[in-house]
Image (tube, grey):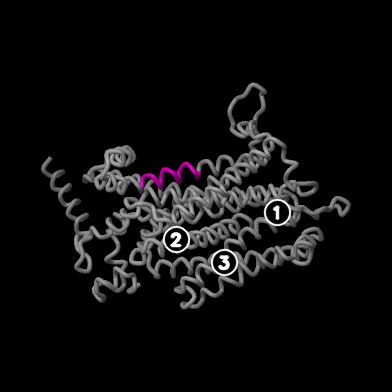
Amino acid sequence: MADAIMQSHEAAAKRIERVPLVLNNRPMSWITNHVASVTEKSAPIWWWILFGLSSSLAVVSVLCIAYLISTGVGVWGLNHPVGWAWDITNFVFWIGIGHAGTLISAILFLTRQKWRTSINRAAEAMTLFAVVCAGIFPAIHVGRIWMVWFLAPVPNSNAIWQNFRSPLLWDVFAVSTYFTVSVLFWYTGLVPDLATLRDRAKTKLRKFFYGILALGWRGGNRQWKHYEMAYLILAGLSTPLVLSVHSVVSFDFATSVIPGWHTTIFPPYFVAGAIFGGFAMVLTIMLPARAIFGLHDLITDDHVDKMCKIILLTGSIVGYAYAMEFFIAWYGGNAFEQYAFINRATGPYWWAYWSMIFCNVAAPQLFWFRYFRRHVIWVFIVCNFVNAGMWFERFVIIVTSLHRDFLPSSWGMFYPTWVDIWTFVGTFGIFLALFLLFIRWLPMICIFEVKAVLPEADPHHGHHDNDNVLKGGAH
């Protein structure tokens, strides 16, 4: 018993040493106050404006979905031979965005990258909201949404069983597993900070709300021990999911015999593209949040610089994959495959292909230069080019491979209808509305993890005054 007590005290002492009480002559509580105040103060006018706009877009998407369900998929631009188009393009686009959050949280956690602590929670939340938007499209593209439960492998009165050899069913398992583990991972990381908000709550309603969510957290040594073990296990579970989920999504195409799809490069190509687009979206939403809430001392230019480097790396991998697709089409000697890629670059959808090349390959090359990686306006512009380019990539892969396949007599063109367009635009409203609710009611930065690493992560520690830190100028 005495040994156990001594070990407990030693562990607590190590934790106290790891989280100093004073940083740059300021009490460490400034971090808690800075982050928690976002949820405690009244919502600023900009929040209501953005939430109103995003909610309006979300309502538009819901109305379009209701119109689709009541009328039929004929209101979309789908046709023969383009049976997959706008819906699956958007599904793959949103799933890809959801990869950066788990990558930042799980893989960077396992590799002990301390710079992840300021951005991991917002990125995890972005993952969940992106997967919610992605899940809409497989559900509604089946046409009869009330029959979508047949996708689940459960006994039913019609004696219909799923085709387990279909990659579409693999998607159901992969995406649902990824979403479940991501929710658990995100919520587990929130628990200590929810307890902080509970203890700081000024009203009984807020104290009750955060108290329920905090699950009785008191910050004892035993709780920290179990928390760290659970977080490590979930990080270990999440890591293979990052690699597997988008690989499984790519099997929707790679296991077919359609020219332009039937290729083994798709799994790593899709994973690299998902991380590429996901990091771009993280910066797209985090840079405005940092500016509005004055979080420059927690989300520093070093964080932005590192994420830009990852975008440059994964963008280079994506550019290499584009080149390899053309090389393999030529080297394989398959006339159908060769024409599919020539058609992408010179056919009716040439504008989509070259938009993809410019946005995904050319634009990120600016990040070779430190000036562009640390200039917020340029970073924001390039990231939005990447967001657009990743959507064009999915559109090019799906539509240009289908509209001209084996028989010229069955060639056709796809043109989106207003229902296609506004359903997709409305999902951005759903995504932004959920994210705005998140930053309004939950801490968008992991308070206790930042406290643990900030002194070591701050390259200017001890070399700048307090006023400069508060203004974010030192970073």
Q: Residue at x 55, y 44 (%)?
A: 175
How far is disc 1 from disc 3 in space, using C-alphas?
20 Å
Give the residues drawn in magenta, as a range.
178-189
Q: Is residue 327 left or right of residue 284?
A: right
Q: Is residue 43 left or right of residue 21?
A: right
Q: Is residue 33 left or right of residue 81?
A: left
Residue type marked 2: Met
**Where does residue 5 sit, x and y in percent of width and height?**
14, 44
Mark found first going from the N terminus, 2 or 1: 2
Front one among 40 and 328: 40
How far is disc 2 from disc 3 in space, using C-alphas?
20 Å
Front one among 262 and 200: 200
Identify the disc placed on residue 286: 2
**Residue 102 seen in the figure:** no
**Residue 398 seen in the figure:** yes
Mark found first going from the N terminus, 2 or 3: 2
Q: Quadrant of residue 353?
A: bottom right
Front one among 342 and 337: 342
Q: Residue at x 16, y 52 (%)?
A: 10
Q: Residue furthest top?
A: 157
Mark found first going from the N terminus, 1 or 3: 3
What is the total number of numbered labels drawn onto the structure image? 3
Q: Quadrant of residue 216?
A: top left
Residue type marked 3: Gly
Q: Is residue 157 above or below residue 200?
A: above
Residue type marked 1: Ile
**Where does residue 11 sit, x and y in percent of width and height?**
20, 51
Q: Residues within 10 Å of mark 1 (few under 14, many from 20)?
A: many
> Which residue position holds label 3?
315
Q: Is residue 442 left or right of residue 402?
A: left
Question: Tags 2 and 3 in contact by the CB under 8 Å rule?
Answer: no
> Which residue position holds label 1?
398
